[in-house]
Amino acid sequence: ENGLYMIQSDGLINSSKTGLDASSGVYDFENMHAYIGSSNLVIVNEGRELTGVDAFRDVISGGWYYDYVKYVYDRGIMTGMNGRYFGVAENLKRAQFATIIYRIAGSPEVKYEPVFWDVPDGTFYTSAAIWAQMNDIITGYTSDGSFGGGDDITREQMATIMFRYAQHCGYDTSQRGDISMYPDATNVSGFASEAMQWASAIGLIKGDNGMLNPQGSASRVHCAAIITRFMEFYKL
């Protein structure tokens, strides 16, 4: 354009040259670029324009998560952080997960009510948070009545929310798995025990390096995997 090509910058690699330097922060695909005159470049090959999930520069075709990301993206359940970045390794936030469940439910129209003091009108997750609270799917933190939309969602919170959603929809949630086989099963919070047993039984949660890791956070691609398994199990 205007006699220039935009070229993508390399990321800063670590001293062992095995990957990006984690201390330099997340690589910014949108801003780490430069421009060079077209007369100084020779085109050796022209690639096709990537569309759909393939347009995300951090989603690798053939990666273990690729089919899961494609499943949720093609159905409009999960979108990217922007048009070129899905956020594969980023932790999922409570606000994002509420929005995902809300989309699965068909995004029903709701009227704004101040059900959580930290959920104002007009945010991307406002309707999702209100709908989830009204249907007893997400009750928020009992300690202060907040929603905590910016907090990383934990694995046991995710299981609990999906369990409540399945019950809300009238699905069969009688399945129970034996989670005592996991060394950290006693770390599961009381509110999440039944949900974690159910999630284990139907294959939503398959352990994290041999552990349940109930208070551990979940990445966006792990969420994509769990949502896909949920929808396939209930044939949605």
Image (spheres, rainbow, N blue to C red):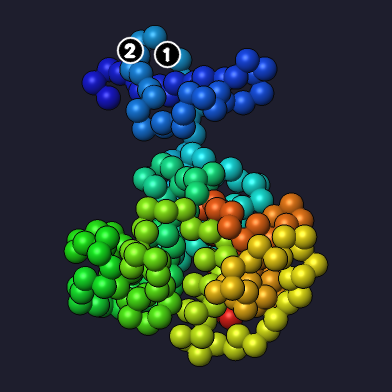
Percent position (x, y) of residue 134?
33, 80
Question: Image check: 141 left or right of 57?
Answer: left
**Image coordinates for residue 222, horizontal then vertical, percent:** 58, 56
Residue at the front extreme of this rendering: 143
Closest to the observer, 176 or 186: 186
Question: As displayed, is residue 125 above or below residue 106?
Answer: above
Q: Residues within 10 Å of mark 2 (few under 14, many from 20)?
A: few
Asked if 146 appears above or below 231 in the picture, the reply is above
Disc 1 marks which residue? 41
Q: Secondary structure at mark 2?
A: strand
Name the residue type under label 1: Leu
Vertical order, 51 against 27 (above or below)? below
Read off the residue under disc 2: 37
Question: What residue is drawn where x is 40% and y is 70%?
Answer: 142
Quarter of image, res 124:
bottom left
Say left or right for 69 vs 112. right
Give residue 172's quadrant in the image: bottom right
Towards the viewer: 59 or 23? 23
Q: Which label was assigned to residue 17? A: none
Secondary-structure class at tag 1: loop
Which kind of residue does numbered mark 2 sit on? Gly
Asked which quadrant contains residue 82, the reply is top left
Can you name the residue that lies furthest to the top here? 40
Q: Are marks 2 and 1 in contact (CB under 8 Å)?
A: yes
